[in-house]
Amino acid sequence: MTGTMKKDHQADLGTAPVGKLLRSMTIPSIVGVMAYNLYNIFDTLFISLGAGINAIGGVSVSFPLFLFLSAVSSTLGSGGASVMSRALGEKNYEKANKTAANTFLVFYTMAILTTVMGLLFLDDLLLMMGITEELLPYAGAYTKIILIGAVTSTGFSSLIRAEGSSTYAMLIWLIPMVTNVVLDFIFILALHWGVTGAAAATVLSQCISMGMSIYYFFLSGKSVLHLSLRHFIPDRKLISEILLIGIPSFIQMSGMSLSIIIINRFLKAYGGTLPISAYGIASKIYTFFLIPITGLTQGLQPVIGYNKGARRPDRVREALKLSSCVSVGYGIAVCVITFLFSNEILRIFVSDTQVADLGTRILTIINSGLLFSGPQYVQAAYFQAVGRKWTSLLLALCNYVIGFLPLLLVLTKIYGLDGVWYALPSSAILTLALSCVLLMKGTQFKINKAAQ
């Protein structure tokens, strides 16, 4: 790619009509996030066909560890992308180069530490997550391989998207997803490797994703960055900035892991394997419905970050307004679809009547929260993109800790098992209310400051 073509990516972020720009950034992001999440959907489907209900339960209980690995890469990817987008908007290419290099450096350090610590304390971690004895062998076999492949769980697609190369960022997840489906079929159904085959397929597919990221930055000539060894010298100030901005993403994903762990412990007390398996399937379907919102926020962040750096507040406001409207419309559509077809959706993944019936009730309740989670995620993406790290941190804590835990305790005392499901949308409503207050407060502060 020529230098002019490289610059065109950045020119589009700063000058293209905002609606058209959001479409061009968001649609590939949605496809990429969908491909990433289909890893888990296809694993569940193939495990259901080839290994049985206990295998599904074991993988579902170990899912929080998979989310934790994703949280590590998301922390660095989102933090690095925010810093890099604003640097590119300011035309500060040296800072953009150093940001990408330091993101790589910290990621591989953290991934290696996660692998070592996870393997040393694997059984203790699984027992802490509330796993039953009959599910432990399945969870252990699956999680061990996922941990060994932690270094392949990269967040570099966020950095590629920060340059404006949304299509390549999409391919980084689409191609490995197709590979994962093929390997799942071979390893689980043809070779009968069960959960071991599912984990191996996931890790091998992630190797392709990692290889494509490395190729883009170092070999393809497509990147606007020009990385050299001097950029890889650790910069403590820059690393701190990346981590502080990325921490809300870590809390969001690891908070999701923590909430699943806590919920599984409640479910173990309220009924054991049946509600654990039903919730495991319903939560993965919920994650699938969340994909367009996640893709929307990923496409939104570089648009806001770049225009923040380029001092174009009018474009920032327009992008935020359009994205908020889209998220509300999508939330309404999901509520209608779930109300009408939740049982049919569940039966795609499980034939057991009891699991499907309970999963239907769970999915109907938790999917109602998307009506509120959508605009809240959009606002959180805005705060993160403009560098308002403490606001982003507060919202992440509210959604998964400060708001969720008290609601879970109170609602389970009132409604029993149903209180577990009610806590999730209730937490989304509370967090959205707080986010709206903080957004209006920040806007009013800027208006008052401009009037002085």
Image: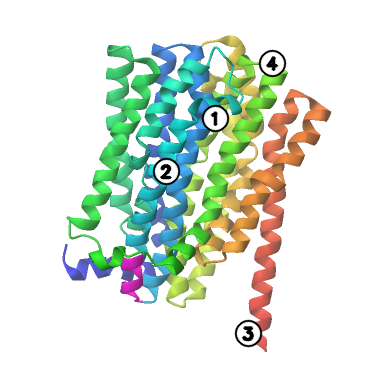
Q: What is the magenta range?
A: 91-98
Residue at point 39%, 71% (across, down): 87
The mark nearer the N terminus, 2 or 1, is: 2
Which dot marks residue 113?
2
Residue 22 left/right relative to 341: left
Residue mark closest to the camera, 2 vs 4 = 2
The mark nearer the N terminus, 1 or 4, is: 1
Q: Main secondary structure of the magenta part?
A: helix
Around disc 3, counting alpha carbons within 10 Å, would you say few (fewer than 14), some (14 to 19), or many (20 or more)?
Answer: few
Residue type at mark 2: give it. Leu
Q: Nearer the viewer, residue 178 or 326?
A: 178
Residue type at mark 3: give it. Ala
Q: Label 3: which residue? A: 450
Look at the numbered disc 4 and give the secondary structure of its residue: loop
Residue 339 shows in the view:
no
Q: Label 4: which residue? A: 271
- Label 3 and label 2: CA atoms lie apart by 47 Å
Which quadrant of the view contains residue 353? top right
The mark nearer the N terminus, 4 or 3, is: 4
Residue mark closest to the camera, 3 vs 2 = 2
Look at the numbered disc 3 and give the secondary structure of its residue: helix
Residue type at mark 4: give it. Gly
